[in-house]
Image (cartoon, rainbow, N blue to C red):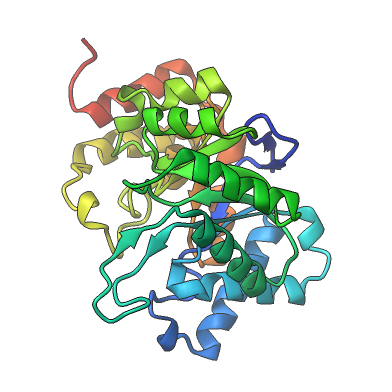
Amino acid sequence: MKSISLGQSGLACSRIAYGCWRLAGTWNAAEVAPAAEAVGRRAVLAAFDAGYTLFDNADIYCGGGAEKILGQALKEAPGMRGGIVIASKCGIRPSGAPLPDSPCRYDFSGDYIVSSCEQSLRRLGVETIDLYQLHRPDYLMDPAEIASAFQRLKGAGKVREFGVSNFRPSQVTALQKACPMRLIVNQIEISLANLNCFEDGTLDQCLGEKITPMAWSPLAGGQLGDGAKKLLPSQEGYRVKPLLVAMDLLAKNHGVSRTVLALAWLMKHPSGIVPIIGSTNAARIREAARAAELDLSREDWYRLLEAARGEPLP
């Protein structure tokens, strides 16, 4: 698969990333059976065999279960670690932890960031996380405190590079001013069904500051691919039926699937969008990799944009 550099860093990875959030098959760590772990390990190895070298994870995915499964897969394929970029995220604290009445909240306090990273390292079974991201903006975040935590982790050799996820441009700017190291990615929802980042300045900032946008849910929860199995509440109102008609026509013209077309559309943008796909089906993992070879014309790109907007450009 083609490769891309992440931000202004020395990290290079596959043009499409493999997302690990579905590896355990559940969000409840207590429900993960050995058979489910085996499915997850096979998916990781299938992605690696298909050319994916960026594996995106988070401590909240199945309460750390997804990180454990990725770590198990690394043990099964000893040469894999040296050929991939491991990304993980922290900052979301679920309700009921550590106390029964604790609410769901975001936590970017310095000690929590460091502690979360150390726990992720243990679950992954590695000494260093290549890319560590703050998962969702903490309303109480102190950029100076975060910068100090980042320095502690980098100085200890526990993290190579840092990024954010779901940050508004103003939040990225505030944090970057306090950080001596460059933030190299902003992971956000981007798809033909969700065009917000094209209008709110996020991609403009990524272009100007050379920050790589990583696109989570690039198929809108599967609605732009083979169909949705489980949508986020925010995705349930997406109007995709008219868009799918236009996608099917272009996909047929190019001899590809809707999945390939949707991913290729994202990668056409000059900011270097890296889509994250999360299927555990080996055939679908391989199919998605084909998108790295499809270069859409400007005309076809705008045809899809117009269909996604549901109206002509002004």
Question: 280 or 293, which is in the foreground?
Answer: 280
Q: With 234 as the anchor, is 27 left or right in this view?
A: right
Q: Quadrant of residue 294?
A: top right
Q: Is residue 269 above or below residue 143?
A: above
In the rendered image, which quarter is residue 308 located in? top left
Q: Residue at 37% of width from left, 77% of height from top? A: 98
Give the number of marks: 0
**Going 20% across and 43% down the picture, which residue do you hit?**
241
Residue 184 in percent (x, y) is at 59, 35
Front-lying residue, 148 or 262: 148
Q: Quadrant of the N terminus?
A: top right
Instruction: Identify the residue at the far top of this view.
Output: 314
In percent of width and height, residue 7 lies at: 62, 32
Residue 174 x, y percent position in the rendering = 44, 30
Q: Which quarter of the figure has residue 94?
A: bottom left
Q: Kindly identify the residue that appears in the image at 74 percent across and 49 percent down.
A: 155
Q: Nearer the viewer, residue 61 or 139?
A: 139
Vertical comparison of 273 with 280: above or below: above
Query: Quadrant location of the C terminus?
Result: top left
Left or right of 264: which side holds 306?
left
Residue at image x 25%, y 68%? 103
| One can see residue 51 in this view | no
Q: Is residue 264 visible?
A: yes
Give the x, y percent position of residue 76.
75, 76
